[in-house]
Amino acid sequence: MEARLLIVFSIFVLGNLYWGYRYFSAYKDSSLGKGERQEALEDIEDYWLQFACVAIIIIMLIAPIANSILSPNG
């Protein structure tokens, strides 16, 4: 079970790194106009927030199970 929790945490970290990379690459993209850049940044922020919320919900669902398995009294 601890492997599953480690996988979920690593997916969360890697996903945040991915969305951070997409955000900063769109921020520095000089081929976009100011309005297009702002719209692209807002879209990326929306997807980033959705990813983070789903990942946190999954972590919240798995953590109690992992805690009960890893506890010495369990």
Image (cartoon, rainbow, N blue to C red):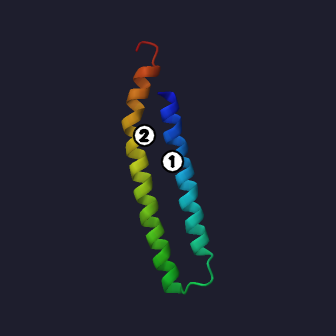
Amino acid type, callout 1: Phe
Which of the 4 quarters of the picture holds residue 28? bottom right
Label 2, secondary structure: give it. Answer: helix
The residue lying at 44 percent from left, 53 percent from top is: 52
Disc on res. 31: none
Residue ranking furthest to the top:
73
Q: Residue at x 43, y 55 (%)?
A: 51
How many marks can you see?
2
Dot 2 crowding, Cα within 10 Å, few <14, some 14–19, many 20+: some
Q: Residue at x 53, y 85 (%)?
A: 34
Residue 63 at x, y percent in the picture: 42, 33
Q: CA distance from mark 1 to mark 2?
A: 9 Å
Marks 1,2: beta carbons within 8 A: yes
Q: Is residue 31 above or below residue 44?
A: below
Which numbered disc covers residue 59? 2
Tell me the element at label 1. Answer: helix
Q: Is residue 68 left or right of residue 5?
A: left
Q: Position of residue 33 (x, y in %)?
A: 54, 87
Taking 70 as reference, is 61 left or right?
A: left
The answer to which of marks 1 and 2 sits earlier in the sequence is 1
Which residue was labeled with disc 1? Answer: 12
The amino acid beneath tag 2 is Ile
Q: Quadrant of the C terminus?
A: top left
In x, y percent, where is residue 12? 51, 47
